[in-house]
Amino acid sequence: MKQLHWSSFNFALKPIYIGHKAVTVSLLLMFNCLFFVKTGEAQVDGNNTRTTVCNPLNLNYRFSLDKPSRREAADPTVINFKGEYYLFASKSDGYWHSSDLIKWDLVTTGDLPLEDYAPTAVVIGDSVYFMASSNKQGTKIYKSADPKNGKWAIANPAFPISLVDPDLFLDDNGRLYLYYGCSNVNPTYVVELDRKTLMPVGKTIACIYGNNKEHGWERFGDYNEKPIAPWIEGSWMTKFNGKYYLQYASPGTEFKSYCDGLYIGDSPLGPFRLAADNPFSHKPEGFIASAGHSSTFKDNYGNYWRISTMTISVKHPWERRLGLFPAFFEPTGDAYTYTGFGDFPIIIPHKKVSFPAELSGNLMLLSYNKPVTVSSTLNGYPASNAVDEDIRTYWSAASGNSNEWLSIDLQHSCSVKAVQLNFAEQGTEIYGRTANIRYQYKLEYSNDGISWKILADKSSNTVDAPHDYLELPKEISARYLRVINYQVPGGTFALSGFRVFGHAGGALPSQVQKISVLRNMEDPCRVKLQWAKSKAAIGYNIRYGTAVNKLYQNYQVFGQDSLEIRSLNKKFSYYFTIDSFNENGIQKGIKALLLK
């Protein structure tokens, strides 16, 4: 092994972005945010006054049709059609429409094969074209000039290729291509389609194969710990500055390590070369992990975004949610998706941005591992699970009765600006969509634990909001927050995350200054890091990349002082730094070079 140590350097890292620290509280408060406490309303209204979102996205994910009862959505595609956004996802019994990337409305239709996996869509002229996976001959392509109304017609009734995980890509020269493939043996493929007939023309070409001997991010397991051939799937093509960016998912959708890799070519048909900075999107830890099988799209201001699959995979391996992350394509040819603090609030901008720091809500997590009291507890689901920052664990009350409750003690009065309530489906027997799927509750706050004020009254809510995210119009001072159940759609009252965001009013943690970095020379895809814990830190964000100004990768942990990362590229050297964070903000780290 080669080892590099450092202790106290006199220079600070100068990354290409500044992180959450660069945007002050006033940036968030510049916007006229509206927080709803009206009876019967479960989301911010249509006045576009809310400015942030928090992953996982608060969509009315459908309950799967088969046992066990659980929600599922994955393999998402978002397109921008006539200035509005349409989101398609596997097994969703509909698709979503939004005018602002914040509030999404479900569109139902009987015209599309919505039980098929991995839908794709592309805008061609004045219409949207749609297709999905099929293991049968006779796959169809559909089109709609008004997808908001749910009306679709068949554009190609008998597509000749049986395929999985399609991606339709329209080049800016008007030529249409289809990428597809999902296998741990076979490659992904591309073939050109005739614009008029929507039938293949020319030769089908193999694009990329898996290579887990050299690509650590393609290895199985939550932490890339299993030497098993990966599933290479979920293709997506983006063109930028004359180059073709072929994105693909690996190693498997049920793992925290699920991510997207990137190859670049000079033609839509290839050949493709591996990008230096991989994975393209990767979120291996946090409240909810993974950022794989994604699509890339532009908003109305020219910003790139990635809509990704995120994993829970507790009740079933395919129990999944969706997350939204900013992406950046640089004039140098570099491309990356920023997932740092990727389940903290982020701003949806109304302008073109250049750096991730411009999207920071500057809101820190206040609820991690704080004392919790509850009305009751179901055996095996302790109250501490509601604040452990792990969506795979949850607290459950003994029943789903009204007046079951959970209260958090932040331990001193804090400035609270947002709350995310993540409900867990404990003991449900729900399959598909029904009209009575909703969570009704009251959210209260207090500074003494005796006198309580209402923060949100959703006791008459009629909207399905399983990851309800509440952004306040202005901060409140609170030490205690309490959620009181009125009704759940089934099962018990359960929370996988009662997450509170704002500022605690104290000092930043100290800078991490003593780190050792050891690369495994027998398997250079692996690296071990150890560091001296920072004073007053609750967690650390490891940033790393192939150059000192390209720290595109993020790995966030709580309370640890060591970590093994197994997702490196065997052939590249890496730079690392470790930022410390707490309830008051982020302290940037120093820099180091990991020798090859």
Image: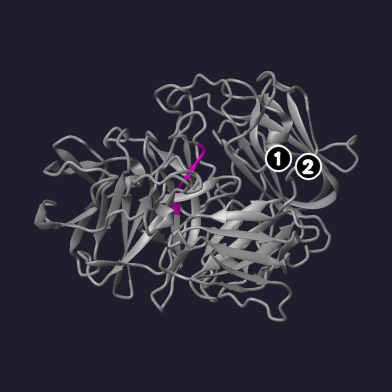
Residue at the location (41% across, 79% down)? 332
Please tell me which of labels 2 and 1 falls first in the chain. 2
Horizontal side of residue 316 vs 491, given as left or right? left
Q: Residues within 10 Å of mark 2 (few under 14, many from 20)?
A: some
- Mark 1 lies on a secondary structure that is helix
Magenta part mainly helix, strand or loop?
A: strand
Q: Position of residue 180 (x, y in %)?
A: 24, 50
The quarter holding residue 333 reads: bottom left
Q: Position of residue 396 (x, y in %)?
A: 67, 26
Count numbered badges in the picture: 2
The quarter holding residue 275 reads: bottom left
Front residue of this view, candidates 86 and 223:
223
Work out whether residue 580 can be spotted: yes
Front residue of this view, candidates 225 and 61:
225
Residue at the location (82% across, 63% down)? 507
Q: Which mark is residue 370?
A: 2
